[in-house]
Image (cartoon, rainbow, N blue to C red):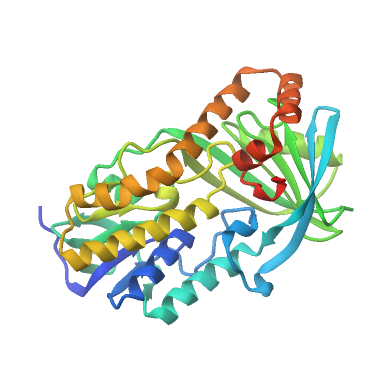
């Protein structure tokens, strides 16, 4: 069935989703002179905030005004036991809204166009249907998160594994350069909880879990702080696992839409950088050679991003499975005796590597 409606635009590339993966892909492609249009369903870029924003310096150069805090120490807690480590390389705590806006502005300055409050509704014969009309494109990029509408529209199956994230802001007293990481099946089944300070008086406190995030966050807050007021509650759903296929004819998925996240921590910003660069180069090559077939995109995009991320993702899945099968004391013993380098990589806290 052909889409009905007015053709409002015709461009080389349409990217659905103005998050980090979408904006970085857009910037890469538009710098080669191609027309790129980014669609974002929300009225403002960067909202709602969907990430704690704690990253290593592998994220690349970031303006100082986006960095909220720099963290040098980590405290690993499990039950009443804990240990602390220190590293020369600092972790960066970002203002995620400003970070997303900065990436969008970079893409826009390079030449990309943005349409906000615009929802993707379907794709057929090179034409995209939105709530504001039809758009003709040569390539469609789904950078629209874990419940990707682009994936559903073109029949790409997504892994069914889900993690639920919940976070609040807490006012108390904190060591401003110390992040707390809490483990245990009574704390956050399937993952962990965190206390990440913005300064000595304010911290982002949250967790990832496979079920009942409100229940487990409430329990964690009582255990860590006692009775305390919270504000700015935010939540998100993360999909993880190895996607069987991330491309179709004229279509590719990138970022959270392609499950390019760390299965244990849900960390995705560093993986987003890797995959969006590969996606951008594949799109450029596709446009140069006028080849938009699934086979071409498999060879030039999927094969290349999986060469970089397949084993790290599979390692994270294995580690997550082990955590789900062992007791809380055993979890702590495993963490303490595992190579800090390997464990840091699984958590997406690369600053802990020595």
Q: From the viewer's perspective, is 91 left or right of 234?
A: right
Is residue 147 something that shows in the picture?
no
Q: Name the one closer to the observer, 204 or 66.
A: 66
Above or below 81: residue 231: below
Q: Is residue 64 or residue 41 the one in the foreground?
A: 64
- On screen, residue 116 above or below 331: below
Residue 96 point in image, percent of width and height? 60, 62
> Residue at point 37% right, 80% down?
111
Looking at the image, which residue is at 52% across and 32% down? 315
Quarter where residue 57 is shown:
bottom right
Please say if 80 is above or below 127: above
Q: Is residue 246 visible?
A: yes
Outermost residue, left side: 1
Nearest the eye: 5 or 262 = 262
Q: Which image quadrant: the C terminus?
A: top right
Q: Quadrant of residue 88?
A: bottom right
Provide residue 136's location: percent of width, then percent of height: 19, 68
Q: Residue at position x 38%, y 57% from top?
A: 278
277 left or right, relative to 94: left
On screen, residue 289 versus residue 89, left or right, reads left
**242 versus 334 height, above or below:** below
Measuring from the top left, give residue 268's x and y in whole percent.
53, 50
Q: Quadrant of residue 99?
A: bottom right
Where residue 68 appears, as percent x and y from the top left, is 72, 65
Query: Which residue is depicted at the point 76% across and 36% down?
Result: 220
Q: Looking at the image, which is closer to me, 291 or 167?
A: 291
């Amino acid at each position: 069935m052909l889409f009905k409606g007015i053709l409002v635009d015709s461009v080389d590339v349409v990217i659905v989703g103005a998050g980090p993966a979408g904006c970085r892909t857009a910037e890469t492609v538009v710098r080669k002179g191609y027309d790129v249009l980014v669609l974002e369903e929300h009225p403002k870029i960067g909202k709602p905030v969907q990430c704690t924003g704690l990253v290593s310096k592998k994220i690349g150069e970031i303006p100082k005004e986006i960095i909220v805090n720099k963290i040098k120490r980590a405290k690993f807690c499990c039950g009443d036991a804990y240990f602390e480590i220190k590293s020369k390389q600092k972790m960066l705590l970002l203002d995620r809204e400003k970070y997303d806006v900065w990436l969008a502005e970079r893409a826009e300055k390079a030449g990309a166009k943005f349409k906000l409050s615009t929802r993707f509704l379907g794709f057929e014969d090179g034409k995209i249907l939105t709530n504001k009309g039809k758009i003709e494109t040569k390539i469609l990029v789904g950078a629209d998160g874990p419940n990707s509408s682009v994936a559903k529209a073109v029949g790409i199956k997504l892994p069914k594994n889900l993690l639920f994230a919940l976070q609040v802001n807490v006012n108390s007293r904190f060591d401003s350069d110390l992040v707390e990481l809490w483990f245990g099946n009574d704390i956050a089944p399937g993952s962990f909880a965190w206390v990440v300070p913005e300064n000595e008086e304010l911290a982002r406190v949250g967790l990832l879990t496979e079920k009942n995030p409100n229940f487990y966050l409430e329990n964690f807050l009582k255990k860590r702080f006692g009775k305390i007021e919270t504000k700015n509650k935010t939540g998100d759903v993360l999909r993880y696992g190895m996607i069987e296929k991330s491309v179709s004819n004229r279509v590719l998925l990138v970022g959270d839409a392609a499950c390019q996240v760390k299965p244990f921590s849900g960390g995705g910003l560093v993986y987003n950088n890797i995959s969006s660069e590969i996606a951008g180069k594949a799109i450029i090559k596709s446009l140069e050679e006028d080849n938009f077939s699934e086979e071409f995109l498999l060879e030039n995009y999927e094969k290349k991003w999986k060469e970089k991320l397949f084993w790290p993702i599979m390692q994270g899945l294995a580690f997550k499975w082990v955590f789900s099968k062992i007791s809380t004391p055993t979890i702590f013993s495993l963490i303490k005796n595992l190579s800090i380098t390997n464990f840091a990589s699984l958590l997406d806290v690369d600053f802990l590597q020595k």
